[in-house]
């Protein structure tokens, strides 16, 4: 990566306790030169937004498996806006049914990655979104 | 109190963060880390408002419970005052990226308005801190956070940098981690102001504490200058005896006592005059680090002008003895005055 590394928050939103996927993403992005802040499982929207604020992240990657994305994700995005971080792109990963995707995008999610996405694809997308194409 | 997006003057940013705006504080911490255009102006504007906070370094082997302990401490402080945490994790030498995971143990305080947590990657620096930490501590100080708790990289290999930056250092050990042998080897036990044996819920913790006390006492008897630091005045002679405390960071026991000892050390620094040493040591170290940075970049150009590539070749071809070659290079850089 050219220039200082980007700071990315990988957040495990919701009540499910499975964070293998989030950890794989976190580790994979680290190995591609990102500084990844990982906050662990069972994060509420307020906790995620607070971490994004204090860590001044360039991008927020939310991992969610519990199915509660329809309520939780818009809350996070609203909090980001309220605290002056409307410009922070939000990525969504995990299991998001096709029918819910338009609503997620309308709420402000920049991109949705399903279980089949590779770390490489995710990293490339992030670099492009943050204006640093390799 | 939301900062608008887009560029902001350093004066404006300083004013906002001093008025308690978290977004501006977080941005300022990024400015200094990325060496943004006006970061020096920012630090200059903030400088008159610094010098209030106690900087507390927390070191110890991986898994000793540093983050958990710091979270507990922050919880206590946060009830009455603003407290900041700088948590440092290593940058991967291979990728340049980092996995910053200390926040996982800080969930309990993550929504406390008085507690500000920032994760930091070392970005290529050895010694357990990043270079930006020095500036970031200054900014947090100016923003009214006190104390500032600094968790160093948990490598157990001598996280010595924090000893220069911090007013007070806490070494965290835990039973069953190779005990204090590791810390002794790295010299951390002797130079820390407070020693904590965490995981007091474990049966062998009392024995670990006893062994550490014994080792420290032995050092004092043999005159091995316990708690002296790089030729500085011996703090023990001035009356500071390192306490060895037991804590259980999960249950929250022993935290009161640790907090009391941190306060006691601050009082002692002022009363004994050791505070001046601390300030001096910190200033000299930071200046050294900064001057070295400039030095390194000039050095390369100067050596190249003195024929570096040719000299490397002759040494590689075994035509020149390396010590003599190095001395001649230096003479060419500095003129005849250099003794190499
Ligand atoms: N039994 C017991 N476990 C503890 C205690 N304090 C922390 N732990 C556990 O020890 C493990 C490591 O705790 P951390 O706080 O992450 O340790 P650390 O020193 O910050 O670790 P690194 O940052 O990775 O070097 C976690 O599983 C904690 O829950 C304690 O007092 N007793
Ligand atoms: Mg830790």
Image: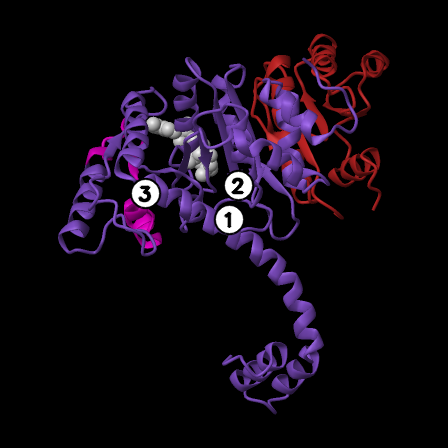
Chain colours: A red, B purple
Q: Furthest residue to the bottom?
A: B319
The span from disc 3 to disc 2 (Cα, nearest Å) is 19 Å
Quarter containing ligand 1?
A: top left
Within-10-Å neighbours for mark 3: few <14, some 14–19, many 20+: many
Q: Is residue A28 left or right of residue B328?
A: right
Residue picked out by circle 1: B286
Chain under disc 1? B
Chain under disc 3? B
Residue picked out by circle 2: B134
Mark nearer the viewer, 3 or 2: 2
- Label 2: element kind: helix
Q: Quadrant of residue B76?
A: top left
**Magenta stretch holds residue B16:** no
Magenta-tinted stretch: B179-206
Identify which residue, B57 or A134, lies in the foreground. B57
* Residue B328 locus on image (x, y percent): 58, 84
Residue picked out by circle 3: B192
Q: Quadrant of residue B165?
A: top left
Q: Which of marks 3 and 1 is nearer the N terminus?
A: 3
């Amino acid at each position: 990566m050219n220039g200082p590394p980007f700071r990315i928050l990988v957040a495990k939103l919701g009540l499910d306790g499975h964070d293998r996927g989030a950890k794989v993403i976190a580790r994979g992005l680290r190995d591609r030169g990102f500084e990844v802040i990982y906050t662990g499982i069972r994060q509420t929207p307020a906790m995620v937004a607070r971490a994004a604020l204090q860590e001044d992240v360039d991008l927020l990657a939310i991992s969610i498996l519990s199915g509660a994305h329809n309520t939780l994700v818009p809350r996070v995005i609203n909090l980001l806006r309220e605290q002056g971080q409307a410009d922070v792109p939000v990525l969504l990963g995990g299991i998001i049914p096709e029918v819910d995707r338009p609503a997620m995008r309308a709420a402000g999610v920049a991109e949705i990655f399903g279980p089949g996405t590779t770390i490489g694809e995710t990293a490339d997308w992030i670099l492009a979104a943050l204006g640093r194409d390799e | 109190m939301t900062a608008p997006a887009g560029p902001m003057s350093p004066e404006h940013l300083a004013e906002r963060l001093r008025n308690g705006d978290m977004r501006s504080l977080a941005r300022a911490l990024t400015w200094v880390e990325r060496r943004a255009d006006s970061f020096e102006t920012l630090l200059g504007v903030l400088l008159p408002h610094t010098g209030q906070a106690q900087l507390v370094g927390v070191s110890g082997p991986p898994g000793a419970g540093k983050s958990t302990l710091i979270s507990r401490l922050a919880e206590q402080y946060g009830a009455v005052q603003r407290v900041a945490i700088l948590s440092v994790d290593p940058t991967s030498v291979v990728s340049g990226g980092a996995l910053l995971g200390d926040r996982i143990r800080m969930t309990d305080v993550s929504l406390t308005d008085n507690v500000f947590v920032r994760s930091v990657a070392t970005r290529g620096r050895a010694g357990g801190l990043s270079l930006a930490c020095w500036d970031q501590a200054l900014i947090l100080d100016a923003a009214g956070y006190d104390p500032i708790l600094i968790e160093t990289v948990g490598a157990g290999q001598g996280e010595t940098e924090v000893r220069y930056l911090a007013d007070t250092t806490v070494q965290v050990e835990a039973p069953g981690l190779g005990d204090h042998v590791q810390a002794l080897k790295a010299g951390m036990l002797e130079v820390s102001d407070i020693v904590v044996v965490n995981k007091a819920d474990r049966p062998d913790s009392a024995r670990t504490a006893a062994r550490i006390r014994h080792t420290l006492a032995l050092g004092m008897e043999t005159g091995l200058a316990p708690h002296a630091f790089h030729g500085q005045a011996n703090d023990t002679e001035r009356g500071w005896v390192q306490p060895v405390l037991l804590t259980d960071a999960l249950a929250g026991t022993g935290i009161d006592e640790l907090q009391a000892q941190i306060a006691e050390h601050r009082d002692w620094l002022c009363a004994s005059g050791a505070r001046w040493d601390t300030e001096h040591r910190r200033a000299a170290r930071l200046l050294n680090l900064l001057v070295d940075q400039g030095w390194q970049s000039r050095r390369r150009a100067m050596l190249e002008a003195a024929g570096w590539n040719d000299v490397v070749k002759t040494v590689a071809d075994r035509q020149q003895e390396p010590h003599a070659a190095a001395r001649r290079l230096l003479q060419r850089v500095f003129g005849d005055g250099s003794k190499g």
